Amino acid sequence: MYSPMIESLIEQFAQFPGVGRKSAERMAFYVLDLMSEADCQHFADVVLETKKSVAFCEVCQNLTDVSPCPICASSRRDKSVICVVEQPKDVSAIEKTGGYNGLYHVLHGAISPIDDITPDDIRIKELLLRLANGTVTEVIMATNPTVNGTATAVYIQKLLKPFGIKVTRIAHGIPVGADLEYADEMTLSKALEGRTEMN
Amino acid sequence: MYSPMIESLIEQFAQFPGVGRKSAERMAFYVLDLMSEADCQHFADVVLETKKSVAFCEVCQNLTDVSPCPICASSRRDKSVICVVEQPKDVSAIEKTGGYNGLYHVLHGAISPIDDITPDDIRIKELLLRLANGTVTEVIMATNPTVNGTATAVYIQKLLKPFGIKVTRIAHGIPVGADLEYADEMTLSKALEGRTEMN
């Protein structure tokens, strides 16, 4: 329906996760109709510059433009705890809580036999290297509570057994503010299993 | 939560219509984590090239990389009818039906006193110029059935009176496949008003 040139712009936007055909059209028309040429140039510059400058932190594998990243380099973080997550955005989610002061390790995925993602495809090796010097006493597995996330947590827990390091898993249960009635059975049984004494 | 550089990339994506903070984060991480540098370069090139090449058709004001656009230049289109729409994507929506063979005119907006959009801010002047040579016998007002769209249609209809051209409005009624029970009163009364004889 559109000229090949406009079509190619729509396709570029449609490649992003969560962007369907309609959203991609809206974004393309925003570029063509409402952005100035200077805005477009700035947009392209930011994409290219950020892509060039941002790489993986040599320690925690999070995305950063300085390596080691500010969290790994900070002297105020507790270096005896590592929280293992699947994605960089999980780090941001945990940081927003303000309740965690340890370090992180980003796996960049989870083991998934169906998608042909093996332990070698995610950054487990890099995690093991960080444990060698004996500073770390606890590893918190904060992978998603999905089949793949849980399998990855269990796999890493088994790997870490010889290190003698405490491996913990984030709690599963009823979200705060949610209604028991609408919780699924799996969550509810996990919530019962993980009950804690009230003080 | 993110480094200033990653934050600026997220903000760039968040400027697009329909893209919230979470979606912008996903798109930024897609760029940083999954796209290659070549992919990013290609993406930036397409945005800039398309922006540079695509302009408004000198006749219908639709977005195009050749002017006049393929629809205006086509010898197989009925040049006696012009369908007036608000946005380029409306042209695409009507073209998809395959049921219209006339020309278009894109206003790039609708009159909206609240947003300070006056008749001079949308391309009404360009429409009047097209009617001067007498080829056009009907103008179809296909602006949205909103307050602004309807006001624009009425405004243009009054402007065109001296030209002696037939001005029509697209039908409002119950969408095909919808349920009468769930139609709002305004749509239902428009559907009754616009009833046609069954043959």
Image (tube, coloured by chain):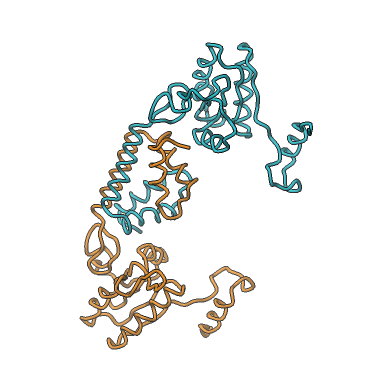
Chain colours: A orange, B cyan
Q: Is residue A99 left or right of residue B182?
A: left
Q: Please provide percent x and percent y for residue B154.
A: 64, 23
Residue at position x 40%, y 67% from top?
A: A94
Residue at x-position 43% and y-position 27%: B69
Side of A79 where A149 appears, left or right: right
Quarter holding the N terminus of chain B is: bottom left
Residue at 22 percent across and 81 percent down: it is A132
Q: Quadrant of residue B2?
A: bottom left
Residue B113 drawn at (x, y percent): 57, 28
Q: Is residue B142 above or below residue B160?
A: below
Residue B14 visible? The answer is yes
Name the one closer to the observer, B41 or A194.
B41
Q: Please state, as top left, top right, bottom left or bottom right, where the C terminus of chain B lies in the image.
A: top right
Vertical order, B104 against A175 (above or below)? above
Q: Residue furthest front?
A: B76
Residue, x 62% and y 74% (percent of image)? Answer: A180
How many numbered circles does the render carry?
0
Is residue A199 at all visible to an observer of this figure? no
Q: Is residue B91 left or right of residue A100?
A: right
Q: Position of residue B87 (x, y in %)?
A: 51, 33
Q: Is residue B189 above or below residue B56?
A: below
Query: Which is nearer the eye, B10 or A26?
Result: A26
Residue B128 placed where, x, y %? Answer: 53, 16
**Relative to B141, does residue A98 appear above or below in the rendering?**
below
For this rendering, which residue is in front, A164 or A45? A45
The one of A191 and A197 positioned closer to us in this rendering: A191
